[in-house]
Amino acid sequence: MNLTFANPWVLWLILPVLAVLLYHYSVIGRRRLGTLRFSSFQLFKGISLSDGAWKRYLLVALRLMGIAFILTAIARPQDQNTQRTVHTEGVDIMLVLDISSSMRAMDFKPNRLEAVKQVAEQFVAQQTADRIGLITFGAESFLKCPLTTDLARLQGFIRDIEIIPEKFDGTAIGLAIASGINRLRDSEAKSKVMIVLSDGKNNAGELDPVTAAQMAQDYDIKIYAIGAGTKGQALMPVKTPMGTQNMRVQVDIDEATLENIATSTGGLYFRATDEASLASIYQQISEMEKTKYEVTEYVQYTELFYWLLLIGLFLLTLETLLDKTVFRRYP
C-alpha cells in the first residue's frame, strides 16, 4: 500500500486540537463540577474518591479518539496505485576486442588486456535497456556472447577473456568487423553500434577493414574505433633463450585506418594511452548512445477516509450514550 493524504495540512491540527480539548476537560471542566456542602464526612468514610474517576477518563478518551479519527479522515488518506508504461528506443552494441599477444603490453596497468576487461565491465554495468554482445579476435574472430540483456552474464564472459593462443595470433580487424555485422544486421534496434578496440594494424584475414566498414555502413551500423597503446614504446613480455623477459617494443597502431573505419560509418576514433583515458572514452560513447525513454504514468487513488470517519463517529456516539446512560452524573 502506498499511503498518501490529499489534505496533509489537516494532520497538523490534530495535536493542538486534542491538546486544547484535553486542557478543557482537565482544568476548566473540573472547575465547573457541581458541589454539595456537608457538615460531616462521616457518611463517606471508606469510599475512595477515585472509584468513579475512570468513567470520566474513559469518556474523555473516547471523545479525543473520535475527534482524532475524524480529523484524520478530513485529511483524506488515499491508497495510491501507480502504473507506468515505459517505451524505449534500444541500442544494440557489439564489443569487438583485440586479444592478440600484443595485448600483454604493460603500458596499461597491469597490462592492456586486463585494463580493457575492467573498463569494458564498467561500461556494461552502466547500460540499462540495451542489448550488448561480445566478439574477440586475433587472426580469427570468436563470438563470446550474442546480443543479450543479461548483462551480469556478459560481464562474466568479459572476465574470462584471455590472450589468444599462438596459432591464432594476429590482428584481423576486417574479419572482426564482418563478424560484428553478421550479428547486428538483422537487429531491429533504433541504433546499431560496434565498438572496435585494437592495439595494432590489420595483418591477417582476407577482408580489409575499410571494405568491412563500407559493409557496416550499408546496414546502418555505426563503428566507434579505439586505438589502445601508449605512443612510442611499451614494455612487453617476450620469450627469449633466457626465459620470458620484459623488453621495450615499438607501439604500432594503424590510426589512419581505424579513423577511416569510424568516420565512414558516422562514428568516431579515439586513442587511449592509459587506463584513465580508456575509461573516459567508453564513458563518452555511453553518453552519445544513450537509450531514449518515454514514460507514461497512470495514477489511481482509492479513498480510505470512509472507515476513519465511521470509527470517529462511532466513538463519539458511544461516548454520548455512555455519558447519558450508565455513566450519567447526579445531580
Image (cartoon, helix red, strand yellow):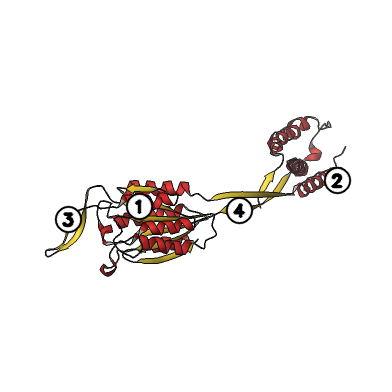
Q: Amino acid at mark 1?
A: Leu
Q: Tell me the CA gap for discs 1 and 3.
A: 27 Å
What element does badge 2 sit on? helix
Q: Amino acid at mark 2?
A: Leu
Dot 3 or dot 2: first in sequence order is 3
Count neighbours of disc 4 (C-alpha within 10 A) and say few if under 14, some if 14 to 19, many if 20 or more. few
Residue tagged 2 = 321
Residue beneath disc 4:
87
Of badges 2 and 4, the one in the foreground is 4
User: Does label 1 or label 3 sit earlier along the sequence?
Assistant: 3
The alpha-carbon separation of the residues under discs 1 and 4 comes to 35 Å
User: Dot 3: what SS?
Assistant: strand
Judged by depth in the image, the label closer to the viewer, 1 or 4, is 1
| Residue drawn at the location 36% of the way across and 47% of the way down | 270
Q: Judge depth for marks 1 and 2 and give the one in front.
A: 1
Label 4 sits on a secondary structure element that is strand
The C terminus, quarter of image: top right
* Quadrant assignment, res 57: top right
Q: Which three-letter amino acid code belongs to the residue tagged 3?
A: Met
Q: Nearer the viewer, mark 3 or mark 2?
A: 3
Q: What's the residue at 54%, 57% (across, down)?
A: 189
Going from N to C along the chain, the mark reached first, 2 or 4, is 4
Residue 208 position in % (x across, y down): 35, 60
Q: Nearer the viewer, residue 261 or 32?
A: 261
Residue in front for this viewpoint, 161 or 5? 161
According to the image, label 3 marks what residue? Answer: 247
Q: Earlier in the sequence, mark 1 or mark 2?
A: 1
Q: What is the x, y in percent for residue 192? A: 49, 56
Residue beneath disc 1? 258
* Horizontal side, residue 252 vs residue 187: left or right: left
